Image (tube, rainbow, N blue to C red):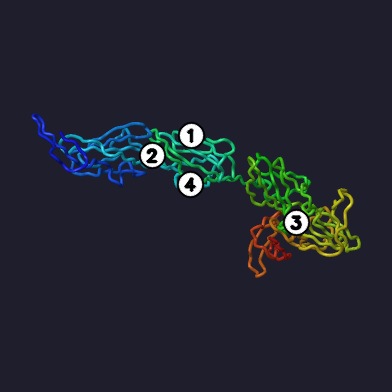
Amino acid sequence: MYRYSQGITQLLACGFFFCYLTVDAQLPELISNDCNRINTPLGLNLSANITGANQYKFKIKNLELGSTDSIVKPIHTFYLDEIPTISRYNCNYEVSVSMDLGLGYGDYGAVCNPSSVAIVTKLRKPDCGKHLTELYTSVYASQTTADSWDFQIRKPGSLNLVEDIFGQTSNSFDLSMTNSSFQQFNQEYEIRVRTTQGSIIQPWGEWCSIYTPPIISKLIDEDCGRHISEDVDPFTLSLYANISTADSWDFQIRNIEDTNNVENIFDRLDNTFQLIMAEDDLFKLYNREYQIRVRTTQGGVIQPWGAWCSVFTPFPLSQPLFPDLTSVSSAGRTVHNSSTNSNLYILNNIGETITETYKLYPGPGNVNILTGVKILNQGFEQPTRWSVTKVPPKIPADKSINLDTAEANIQLFPNPYSEKLTVLLESDPLNHLKLKISNLQGKQIESIFIDKQKLDIKLDYLSPGTYHFQFYDSNNVLIETKKVIKSY
């Protein structure tokens, strides 16, 4: 019979039936590097400190499971995954070793306490720091196999406001799983993940940020770039934001000629805006280009500003052919000067000039549409754009003009123009006219046939500058040349 103890092998006694041999030897245990190893991979070999035995028996207890199992090996090493009953991630173990030197297994040596490595999970790399394209876009944990997945979500740095989403059966997550406080646009949220592996809960991974998309508002397409008709009141006309649901709407307005002067109209309860809402009377003028932008508040979160949209107030002048020289204001009112030459008149132009008195109807502090307020005497408000020409002789109603034989009375307006130009003849031509458009260097740009009294020509594609408009009769004889300015 063999027994192992400390010391040197000695022959103790030899009786009638038995010989007793005491073998004093060191008891086996895991080597020092493995005895209390932490984060041990399940496939890593753990080694006994004594080699040369016939067999080794390793006894292992999983402290988290409370289960014990053993394995016999012909070599002095084993690894945890060789024992599926107790092999788990993120567990603490008790391991002891016994060996057989040929006369049976001796006593177990000292107990060692290694621990197994944990599976630490976080959002996968493409989703950690992701800017979501939609509010409920899915993000995914990096660990694809597990009993279950637990998620936590919070606002950045918040230790108190954390929501648990536990026991998920897949590694995907989206904000629809949370309460409404974590379903806001234009927000940063932090998410972390852990898994359960073989009934053992694994540690939490690090927090990862995700960013929800903002709601960008602007005026609806119909109102963005709108030229308000003369048939409506431009200051009470409702303009609409394209987002129809929100806590509130904020609007800003500015004049294209002074973009530093911005007025705020905040906390609107619907998505409508009218120029009359502005307090500054400078935003209640005719013949102006105003720019408006919008933002909303969604779930208590202010969203970003949308793009500026232009809105053009009308220039409601009367039709041309006034019998006297008239001063024209951008407010769309006229003051007649009866002492001027009766053979002169002003075309319907875009522009402003003052000859005697500039009146605004109604004016600041005056809502009476019949009485104006004098705000400028004798001068020019730039840019000045107007054209004066002579009224042609009256032609009897029963006699039409033959543009082949008589000098044509051809009107072009507005001049300067920006998009569309109108050609107006005294009467319907008997034969067609030909219009040739050339630049100041004489290069012909366009050629157009005119076969009716009034023709609207869309020439917005021309570059800003000055052009010659030459009118030819059907015999290609030059009738008249006019200078036209393309403003922008």
Q: Amino acid at mark 1?
A: Phe
- Mark 3–mark 2 distance (CA, rounded to whole Å): 90 Å
Q: Which residue is mark 4?
A: 128
Question: Which residue position is annotated with label 3?
Answer: 424
Which of discs 2 and 4 lies nearer the camera? The answer is 2
Residue 48 pos. (x, y %): 25, 43
Q: Quadrant of residue 484?
A: bottom right
Number of residues whose C-alpha sits closer than 10 Å to that of mark 3, classed few (under 14), some (14–19) or many (20 or more): some
| Residue topped by disc 1 | 166
Q: Looking at the image, is mark 1 or mark 4 nearer the viewer?
A: 1
Q: Residues within 10 Å of mark 1 (few under 14, many from 20)?
A: some
- Under mark 3, the amino acid is Leu
Q: CA distance from mark 2 to mark 1?
A: 19 Å
Q: Which mark is residue 402?
A: none
In space, the residues marked 1 and 3 are separated at their CA atoms by 78 Å
Which residue is most to the top? 17
Quadrant hosting residue 421: bottom right
Q: Who comes first in sequence, dot 1 or dot 3? A: 1
Task: State how far apart marks 3 and 4 are (Cα).
Answer: 67 Å
Give the side of residue 358 with respect to residue 142, left or right.
right
Task: Give the mark toward the camera: 1 or 3.
Answer: 1
Residue bearing the label numbered 2: 90
Tag 2 near tag 4, CB within 8 Å: no
Residue 406 seen by the camera: no
SS class, disc 4? loop
What crowding class fits label 4: few (fewer than 14 Cα within 10 Å), some (14-19), or many (20 or more)? Answer: many
Q: Give the quarter of the image for residue 44.
A: top left
Q: Write the residue at 57% across / 35% down.
A: 179
